[in-house]
Amino acid sequence: MTKNHYDVIIIGTGPAGITAALYGVRLGLKVVVFGDIPGGNTYMIESLENYPGFPGGISGTRFGVQAFQQAQQEGAVFTMIRLSQFSQEKEQFIGIDAAKQKYTSGTAIVATGRIPKRLSVPNANVKGVHFCSLCDGPLYRGRNATLAVIGSDNGAGQHARTLARIADKVLLVSRNKEFQMDAALSKGIKALNNITLLPGREVIDYKGNEAIEAIVLEGREGDKKTIAVDGVFLAVGWRTNTKMLHLPVEASTAGYLKTDGKLMTSCPGLFAAGDVRETDMYQVLTACADGARAAKYCAEFLEKKNIG
Ligand SMILES: Cc1cc2nc3c(=O)[nH]c(=O)nc-3n(C[C@H](O)[C@H](O)[C@H](O)COP(=O)(O)OP(=O)(O)OC[C@H]3O[C@@H](n4cnc5c(N)ncnc54)[C@H](O)[C@@H]3O)c2cc1C
């Protein structure tokens, strides 16, 4: 075996990958983790309030970095580089990183999460369209801005709540007739008098040459309206990060990896954890739980293979 041979290759440094690494090393496995952002998407969470142990919440960035440091202290190897290709040959997994370095392993965990989708409108790439209110919201501070959030779920609601502290006015636009956020968030949003809810309207284009100046909305009856905005924040769905996988693995039509009860994909020895997996909840807590369980089942898989 080469020096770059590991028991487990973990792809992704979000909550799922970090927890898998933490549990993996504590189970005595030789673990290597690929990814570039410590904490993955947690940097987009202004205040993580639904993870037990942090009354009053904790900044997502702080949570992610501390979790990362914890796994590092336990002995997990973090390469801080992405994997550009991942394949399998004779029951051995092969990862090639962005610097063309080769790694091999007996098992692997895909914990690469998902990224937000864009709207497919004619002027889709105009400047001023964002995905992270926490990261880009401050650009509009002190500008008497009107900002539009497009989407209807908890992610959209959280963006609107964050932006309401920065902008003069926030429009929360959804093509659905009803918003689909949890009751506590919905109540909080309705209590903020600078958020206007616009359900049942689809954004069909952005106006603006250099930067966005307005959004064009179409109602359910086909009625159109242009509203001036200074920026747009999108929360309209996700695309899973699975491009690097060069091996046959079953996925849902939306691209989520299918797993069995032990988080193993259709490819023996390959596990999936967190937001990249087809599941019913996409949260930090569930990603962490997936990571822990995937590490345990990697150990089990290797043990059976060595005995067999
Ligand atoms: C705005 C916003 C607010 C949210 N608020 C909350 C909240 O309040 N509470 C809550 O519980 N959850 C919240 N979430 C959801 C939460 O962030 C996710 O459920 C969680 O981060 C999923 O963890 P993960 O490890 O599966 O994936 P991610 O956190 O997405 O991490 C995956 C990592 O893998 C990396 N990666 C991708 N491809 C490769 C590759 N080829 N090689 C190496 N690495 C790769 C990615 O760059 C990323 O860093 C929120 C999400 C958003 C966007």
Image (cartoon, helix red, strand yellow):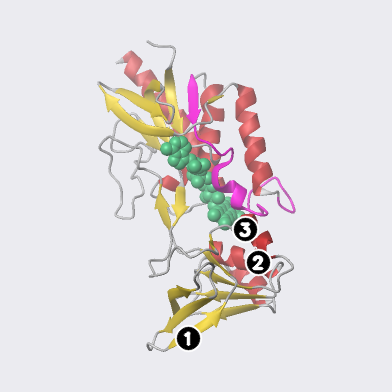
276 to the left or right of 26: left
Of the numbered discs 1 and 2, the one sitting upstream in the chain is 2
Q: Residues within 10 Å of mark 1 (few under 14, many from 20)?
A: few
Q: CA distance from mark 3 to mark 2?
A: 10 Å
142 to the left or right of 246: right
Q: CA distance from mark 1 to mark 2?
A: 23 Å
The quarter holding residue 102 reads top left
Disc 2: which residue: 163
Residue type, numbered disc 3: Asp
Q: Predominant secondary structure in magenta?
A: loop
Query: Which is closer to the viewer, label 3 or label 2?
Result: 3
Assess whether residue 55 is covered by the magenta stretch. yes
Disc 1: which residue: 225
Of the numbered discs 1 and 3, the one sitting upstream in the chain is 3
Residue type, numbered disc 2: Leu
59 to the left or right of 5: right
Q: Which residue shows up at 71% across the image and 67% down it?
A: 166
Assess whether residue 229 is covered by the magenta stretch. no
> Which label sits on residue 200?
none
Q: In x, y percent, where is residue 22?
A: 56, 29
Disc 3: which residue: 136
**Do the residues bearing badges 3 and 2 touch, measured as CB atoms within 8 Å?**
no
Q: Specify the quadrant that holds the C terminus.
A: top left
Q: Specify the quadrant that holds the N terminus.
A: top left
Mark 2 lies on a secondary structure that is helix
Using the rendered image of the protein, determine whether residue 71 is visible from the camera's viewpoint: yes
Provide the residue span drawn in magenta: 30-57
